[in-house]
Image (cartoon, rainbow, N blue to C red):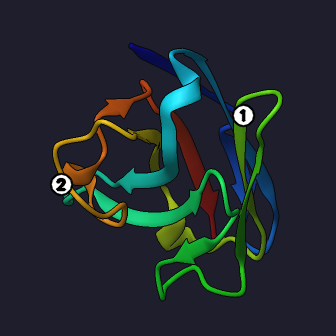
């Protein structure tokens, strides 16, 4: 079992920055990858960024490339999402997700490929 807790959300003006953090606990030794997804009201949950736990390889949605940066601390079992140059369209609830080595699905760029989820943290960007 893995438990995930997000923090760092809030209200920021367009062009500003926020840093989200996700703390993992439980069976964290089995982590294969961790990712960030977001969901705006009335919209589908969408992929934002992900990182392979062992290699540190990062992946980003086209909409956030060059603005967002995902990083992890293996020792602390945390993953952060640094968000710069925020836009109003970035407004959403941001979810941290974990994919463990014993996941039934391959890949780590889609929500159904992750098997643990946090409760989410609200990010609101004003224009």
Viewer-proximal residue among 102 and 82: 102
Among the two numbered marks 1 and 2 on one chain, the one whose residue lies closer to the N terminus: 2
**Residue at 49% in and 31% down:** 30
Disc 2 target residue:
42
Please say if 27 is above or below 40.
Answer: above
Q: Quadrant of the N terminus?
A: top left
Judged left or right of residue 49, residue 55 is right
Given residues 96 and 2, the one toward you in this image is 2
Mark 2 Cα-neighbour bin, 10 Å: few <14, some 14–19, many ≥20:
few
In screen coordinates, is 16 left or right of 59?
A: right
Camera-nearest label, 1 or 2? 1
Q: Secondary structure at mark 2?
A: loop
Left or right, 18 with reference to 37: right
Q: Mark 1: give few (<14), some (14-19) or many (20+) Cα within 10 Å.
A: some
Q: Which residue is mark 1?
A: 78
Determine which quarter of the picture holds residue 10: top right
In space, the residues marked 1 and 2 are separated at their CA atoms by 29 Å
Q: Helix or strand or loop: what does disc 1 sit on?
A: strand
Q: Quadrant of the C terminus?
A: bottom right
Residue at 62%, 59% (x, y): give it. Answer: 125
Residue at the location (53% across, 77% down)?
A: 60
Residue 20 in the image, given as x and y percentages of width and height: 70, 43
Task: Indicate whether 12 appears above or below 73.
Answer: below
Residue at 26% of width from left, 40% of height from top? 103
Mark 2 and mark 1 in contact (Cβ < 8 Å)? no
Query: In front: 33, or 118?
Result: 33
Q: Residue 25's quadrant in the figure?
A: top right
The foreground one among 7 and 28 is 28
């Amino acid at each position: 079992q893995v438990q995930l807790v997000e923090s760092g959300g809030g209200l920021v003006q367009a062009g500003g920055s926020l840093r989200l953090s996700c703390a993992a606990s439980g069976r964290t030794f089995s982590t294969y990858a961790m990712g960030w997804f977001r969901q705006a009201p009335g919209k589908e949950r969408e992929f934002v960024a992900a990182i392979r736990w062992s290699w540190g390889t990062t992946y980003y949605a086209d909409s956030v490339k060059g603005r967002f940066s995902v990083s992890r601390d293996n020792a602390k079992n945390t993953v952060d999402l640094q968000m710069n140059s925020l836009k109003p369209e970035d407004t959403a609830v941001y979810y941290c997700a974990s994919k463990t080595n014993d996941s039934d699905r391959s890949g780590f760029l889609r929500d159904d490929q992750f098997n643990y989820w946090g409760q989410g943290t609200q990010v609101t960007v004003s224009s």
